[in-house]
């Protein structure tokens, strides 16, 4: 029986360690059409962070707004009874705001153990607005 448990516990440990690894999400480098943060067109490859996002690294490379339901640039997120944009949760990980960029948040945002980094270049101005 002992030989059976060792491979099972090893497999479970490996699967859990893979699921806890950070995933990186990168925004587009220019946002001339004013896409909002929830719009898949704002994310490189159309891959946006989930909600809640656990151990994510989110790189914002162009100015953007995080808005409540009804004000999204994605028409599918403007339904009357939707609530998923009204409460955004990040658990662990990092939000990086790069370049001459502004991140404006106009919804309920919960950050648990998240690092927010503004800028990587002393000659540009980055902004983080919470309303």
Image: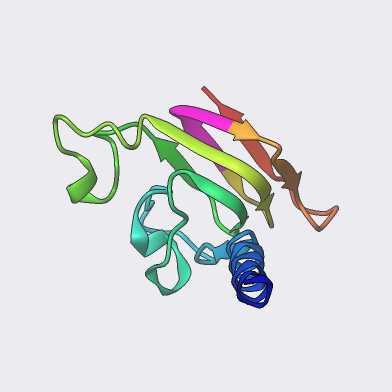
Farthest residue, direction front: 1
Q: Is residue 8 left or right of residue 31?
A: right
Task: Write down the region rendered in magenta.
Answer: 103-110
Q: Is residue 78 left or right of residue 55?
A: left
Residue 40 lies, in percent from the top left, at: 35, 60
Residue 104 counted in the magenta span: yes
Asked if 37 appears above or below 88 in the picture, the reply is below
Residue 22 counted in the magenta span: no
Main structural element of the magenta stretch: helix, strand or loop? strand
Q: Nearer the viewer, residue 1 or 21?
A: 1
Q: Residue at x 38, y 69 (%)?
A: 46
Quadrant location of the N terminus? bottom right
Residue 72, quarter of picture: top left
Q: Nearer the viewer, residue 122 or 130?
A: 130
Farthest residue, direction top: 131
Asked if 38 appears above or below 26 in the picture, the reply is above
């Amino acid at each position: 029986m002992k030989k059976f448990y060792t491979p099972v516990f090893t497999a479970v440990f490996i699967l859990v360690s893979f699921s806890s690894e950070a995933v990186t999400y990168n925004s587009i480098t220019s946002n001339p059409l004013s896409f909002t943060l929830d719009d898949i067109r704002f994310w490189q490859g159309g891959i946006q962070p989930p909600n809640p996002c656990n151990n994510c690294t989110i790189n914002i490379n162009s100015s953007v707004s995080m808005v409540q339901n009804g004000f999204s640039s994605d028409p599918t997120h403007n339904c009357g009874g939707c609530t998923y944009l009204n409460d955004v949760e990040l658990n662990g990980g990092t939000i990086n705001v790069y370049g001459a960029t502004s991140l404006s948040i106009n919804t309920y945002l919960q950050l648990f153990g998240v690092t927010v980094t503004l800028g990587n270049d002393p000659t540009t101005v980055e902004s983080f607005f919470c309303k």
